[in-house]
């Protein structure tokens, strides 16, 4: 199971966290990954300058609404076992 945490703090919200979440939800649904990916909203991850912050395990990534699909394909999909 991949735990995908998306920041919804003020800065990330302004940078499009809602759109990132929507993209991730659509991809999880389209690929039928409900049993493999658990997405959660999380408040501030303390990486406000680089937001939208997405945490997988201990690593925090910077994702934008424009890069959300490619991030999911290149980073999340390979982690699914």
Image (cartoon, helix red, strand yellow):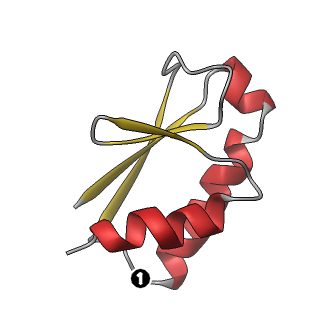
Q: Residue at x 76, y 41 (%)?
A: 16
The local secondary structure at tag 1 comes to loop
Q: Residue at x 36, y 38 (%)?
A: 59
Quarter of the picture containing the C terminus is bottom left
Q: Position of residue 30 (x, y in %)?
A: 54, 83
The image quadrant that residue 26 belongs to is bottom right
Q: Position of residue 71 (x, y in %)?
A: 56, 61
Q: Position of residue 56 (x, y in %)?
A: 35, 45
Residue 34 can be seen, yes or no: no
Q: Residue at x 60, y 30 (%)?
A: 8
Quarter of the picture containing the N terminus is bottom left
Q: Residue furthest bottom?
A: 31
- Mark 1, residue position: 32
- Is 44 positioned to the left or the right of 18 in the image? left
- Is 71 positioned to the left or the right of 59 in the image? right
Residue 74 or residue 55, whichever sits in front: 74
């Amino acid at each position: 199971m991949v735990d995908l945490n998306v920041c919804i703090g003020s800065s990330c919200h302004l940078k499009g966290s809602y759109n990132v979440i929507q993209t991730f939800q659509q991809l999880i649904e389209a690929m039928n990954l409900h049993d493999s990916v658990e997405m959660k909203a999380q408040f501030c991850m303390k990486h406000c300058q680089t937001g939208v912050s997405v945490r997988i395990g201990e690593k925090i990534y910077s994702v934008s609404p424009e890069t959300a699909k490619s991030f999911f394909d290149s980073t999340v999909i390979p982690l699914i076992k």
